[in-house]
Amino acid sequence: AIQMTQSPSSLSASVGDRVTITCRASQGIRNDLGWYQQRPGKAPKLLIYATSSLQSGVPSRFSGSGSGTDFTLTISSLQPEDFATYFCLQNYNYPFTFGPGTEVEIK
Amino acid sequence: EVQLVESGGGLVQPGGSLRLSCAASGFTFNNYGMNWVRQAPGKGLEWVSGISVSGAITYYADSVKGRFTISRVNSKNTLYLQMNSLRVEDTAVYYCAKGGVVRGALDVWGKGTTVTVSS
């Protein structure tokens, strides 16, 4: 199975900050990667699919980039509702695998 | 409104069985692949299983292969997960998730159902 890593595992940031989260795959996955946001006690929510496509209804401050093995989620200006945990998911092949998550906390 | 509602969770002893259901509404169920994802207490997300539109093709994580069976009844807009030989480490919230236009884009999620495996 493809292994996914994320960095950092957690970060502290202020409202208005630019935040970048990285995800790395153990082998090339083309652009078959998505990003999910999970708030405490809630189900995950799809933010980005196919590396850089913004899911309908997701604010444009979220963006994704990358290809092959290295991918990035960027939040251009952090908002109070963005404090959550973010996971990447490779859907290049089965079994799909998630990264371990990045917790974004309030500084 | 597009909605997924899981049910069937509960407390079960190690070695026992449980069947989860996921009722779908608000979209054409038989046009989309479906998935189960779980989250152990305080842990990250783990993709568990997926199934094709027709139900003919199924996929499993190595951790559940041979013990869990995913299925669907399109006429009932319902997804299932039969879980046998349950282990303590299967304790988790189990989410049903709809595949999107892009196969692995899980674009709709249920609220989850809790499975606790304990003696």
Image (spheres, coloured by chain):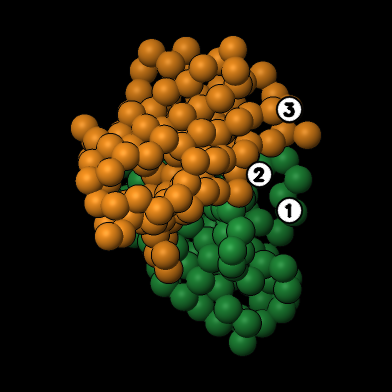
The foreground one among B15 and B64 is B15
Asked whether disc 2 touches disc 1, contact meaning CB atoms under 8 Å apart, the reply is yes
Furthest-bottom residue in this view: A107
Q: Determine the CA span between mark 2 and mark 1.
A: 8 Å
Does residue B52 lie above or below B64 as drawn? above
Horizontal side of residue B87 vs A40, given as left or right: left
Residue A54's label in the rendered image is 2
> How many residues crowd around disc 3 within 10 Å: few (fewer than 14), some, or many (20 or more)?
few
Q: Determine the CA span between mark 1 and mark 3.
A: 26 Å
Quick check: can you spot residue B16? yes
Callouts 1 and 3 on one subunit: no
Q: Which amino acid lies under the numbered mark 3 shown in the image of this protein?
A: Gly
Q: Quadrant of residue A96?
A: top left
Position of residue A84 measured from the top left corner of the image (x, y, whole percent): 59, 68
Mark closest to the chain's N terminus, 2 or 1:
2
Mark 1 — on which chain does it sit? A
Position of residue B13 measured from the top left corner of the image (x, y, whole percent): 29, 52
Rendered orange, the chain in question is B
Rendered green, the chain in question is A
Name the residue located 31 percent from the left edge and 59 percent from the top edge: B118
Does residue B52 lie above or below B50 as drawn? above
Identify the residue position indicated by label 1 in the image.
A60
Mark 3 — on which chain does it sit? B
Viewer-side label of 1, 3: 3
Residue B39's label in the rendered image is none
Q: Which amino acid lies under the numbered mark 2 shown in the image of this protein?
A: Leu
Q: Which amino acid lies under the numbered mark 1 shown in the image of this protein?
A: Ser
Position of residue B34 measured from the top left corner of the image (x, y, whole percent): 50, 29
The foreground one among B118 and A76 is B118
The foreground one among B39 and A67 is B39
Name the residue located 46 percent from the left edge and 29 percent from the top edge: B80
Identify the residue position indicated by label 3 in the image.
B26
